[in-house]
Amino acid sequence: MKLVCGPWTRDVGLEAGAARIDGRQVSFTPLWRDGALDALEIGGEVVPVRTAREGDRVFVWCAGGVFELSRAAGRAARAGEHAGDLVAPMPGRVRRVSACPGEKVGRGDVVVVLEAMKMEHAIRSPRDGVVSKILHGEGELVEAGTVLAEIV
């Protein structure tokens, strides 16, 4: 993804509990209220966060600034696909985890089922591989772009 704030742009990758910003890892803990992201704890400091989505762009208000996140130029990722990881295409609740670490999966196999907007969304493997990690369990709330599982 690209992070835009005023004149500068940064490459951003999201992982469980961390973001890679131009190759530098920043650890954080998301803090939720009523199923929505309310703040991030970064280095022991709680930073209020508000988000809004407009099409493929997400606007984030944080630390007095407004940041825009958008998919990097190039091939658009399919729903649930992100550089070998399966990501949540929208905010929701993990309803079912259908694969375990070490399990072989084929292209199109359902790995995680996400409930969002009162519908279930199957998050499928983009290719044949092996599940290396499941990062969120059943019942957990996740934001759009959250890595749910890794396929190698």
Image (cartoon, rainbow, N blue to C red):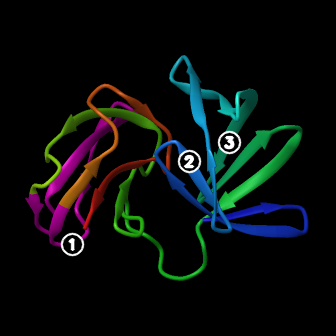
Identify the magenta region: 104-130
Q: Main secondary structure of the magenta part?
A: strand
Left or right relative to 86: residue 37: right
- Residue at mark 1 to residue at mark 2: CA–CA distance: 25 Å
Left or right relative to 65: residue 53: left
| Residue located farthest toward the bottom when viewing the structure as drawn | 74
Give me the disc on residue 18.
2
Locate residue 47: give its quadrant: top right
State the SS at label 1. Answer: loop
Residue 138 in percent (x, y) is at 26, 29
Give me the disc on residue 127.
1
100 versus 83 height, above or below = above
Residues under numbered marks 2 and 3 in contact, where contact means CB atoms less than 8 Å apart:
no
Left or right relative to 110: residue 35: right
- Mark earlier in primary sequence (2, 3): 2
Is 110 part of what is drawn in magenta?
A: yes
According to the picture, the residue beneath numbered tag 3 turns out to be 52
Q: What's the residue type where badge 3 is placed?
A: Ala
Is residue 29 in view?
yes
Q: Residue at x 58, y 33 (%)?
A: 29
Q: What's the residue type where badge 2 is placed?
A: Ala
Mark 1 burial class by Cα count in 10 Å: few <14, some 14-19, many 20+: some
Tally of numbered discs: 3
Q: What's the residue type where badge 1 is placed?
A: Arg
Residue 139 in percent (x, y) is at 31, 25
State the SS at label 2. Answer: strand
